[in-house]
Amino acid sequence: MSEADELCDDCIEAPRKWTAARATFLYKNDARKLVWELKYADRAEIATAAGPWLVKALQPILPENPLIVPVPLHWTRLFKRKYNQSELLSASLAKKGNYQHMPALLKRVKRTPTLLGLNREEREACLKDAIILRKDLAARVAGRNLVLVDDVMTTGSTLNAAAEACLLHNVASVRAVFLARASKND
């Protein structure tokens, strides 16, 4: 099977900035409830439990000497939610996999509205220039293989924005792992 055979229809239609991505679950049924509880019901222990699942999901695309990086929240959303669920997931993944973790590498500098219900183009417009890589940390990641961590991938727009910010600073590659992935068929 060629690399092109592994691409989803959306990835063929709109090429992605990342090399590869994997999820532990499809975003439906119990997985949807799990993500909701992690994100909105102060169930941070779910992230700890998810560490081994994320390690397993990452294995087929694991780069050499990975640096684990969460997708950032804007400070206003972080203040409201009290924690970044992606950072909790990335910390658990890094600990369980014994990988280096850099939670402060990316910063969300633009407050975006909730992306729920928006299509890919609308999401991409909202996220334009919303995520940056901190310049004071850029030298530490040049040439490194990054693994971005997020709770859910819907259209891939947030991951694209984060990956693009990383690639502007000469990282070797960007891959991603998610707790869940939305499907068009659901």
Image (cartoon, rainbow, N blue to C red):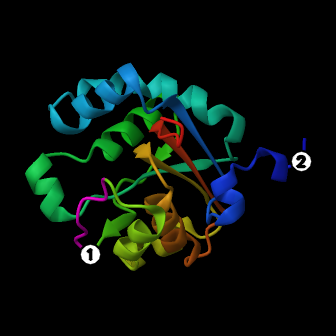
Q: CA distance from mark 1 to mark 2?
A: 38 Å
Q: Position of residue 40 (x, y in %)?
A: 17, 37
Q: Main secondary structure of the magenta part?
A: loop
Crowd tier of the residue under label 2, counting other residues whose Cα lies within 10 Å: few below 14, some 14–19, many 20 or above:
few
Q: Quadrant of residue 11?
A: bottom right
**As displayed, is residue 35 above or below residue 165?**
above
Mark with earlier residue (1, 2): 2
Q: Amino acid at mark 2?
A: Ser
Q: Position of residue 70 (x, y in %)?
A: 40, 51
Depth check, front residue: 150 or 33: 33
Name the element at disc 1.
loop
**Residue identifier under label 2:** 2
Check if residue 137 falls in the magenta segment.
no
Left or right? Give the position of 77 relative to 151: left
Depth check, front residue: 95 or 150: 150
Q: Position of residue 23 (x, y in %)?
A: 54, 36
Q: Residue furthest front?
A: 185
Q: Amino acid at mark 1?
A: Lys
The answer to whether residue 110 is visible is: yes
Quarter of the N terminus within the rendering: top right
Left or right? Give the position of 22 relative to 88: right
**As displayed, is residue 136 above or below residue 107?**
below
Left or right? Give the position of 61 relative to 168: right
Left or right? Give the position of 104 relative to 172: left
